[in-house]
Image (tube, rainbow, N blue to C red):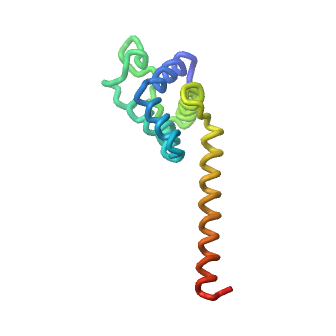
Amino acid sequence: MLDDEQRAALRRWYARPEIIDKARELSQQGRWDELEEHVNMLSLMPLSKIDQLPDYLLKDDGKPLIENNVNPHKDVEEWRDAVEVGWEVMASEIGVSQARLNQNIARQQSSGWDEFLESVEKRKKERGLE
């Protein structure tokens, strides 16, 4: 579990323009799967590069503030907490919450399934199978 200092540092990390701008672009384009990947994974990967971390993600002794670098293979709860922080930032900065993202992904999947079923029926008719 992340403490308050770690959560604050991650809020600052996620609020960086390069993360927000990319998230806004993906949201505006309706690229929901890519937005999820951006927030849940790609934005967190640089945290493993300790020598490139900003000061607010380092302790006074130079070690990472978040010991496991938000790596889900090392600590899945820590990663879940970090993703939760990321979605809090996305909700406030671009107006997309994790719940809204999940609704949009489900809608896309349902639409895709419906289109597939329609194409199956169309092919059956074209082949005279109905």
In percent of the image, x 63 and y 70: which residue is there?
118
* Whether residue 74 is visible: no
Residue 43 coordinates in the image, percent (x, y) = 44, 34
Q: Quadrant of the N terminus?
A: top right
Residue 121 coordinates in the image, percent (x, y) = 64, 76
The total of numbered circles placed on residues is 0
In percent of the image, x 57 and y 17: which residue is there?
4
In percent of the image, x 65 and y 57: which residue is there?
110
Give the vertical position of 100 relative to 6 (above or below): below
Residue furthest toward the top?
A: 60
Q: In this orientation, which residue lies closer to the viewer: 3 or 100? A: 100
In the image: residue 66, left or right of residue 115: left
Residue 46 coordinates in the image, percent (x, y) = 38, 32
Residue furthest toward the left?
A: 51
Residue 63 coordinates in the image, percent (x, y) = 38, 19
Q: In this orientation, which residue lies closer to the viewer: 128 or 55? A: 128
Give the vertical position of 119 relative to 85 (above or below): below
In the image: residue 3, left or right of residue 66: right
Give the vertical position of 109 relative to 93 (above or below): below
Q: Quadrant of the C terminus?
A: bottom right
* Whether residue 67 is visible: yes
In the image: residue 92, left or right of residue 44: right
Residue furthest toward the right?
A: 130
Give the vertical position of 114 relative to 83 (above or below): below
In percent of the image, x 49 and y 34: which residue is there?
24
Q: Residue 64 appears in which quarter of the rendering?
A: top left
Q: Residue 80 appears in which quarter of the rendering?
A: top right
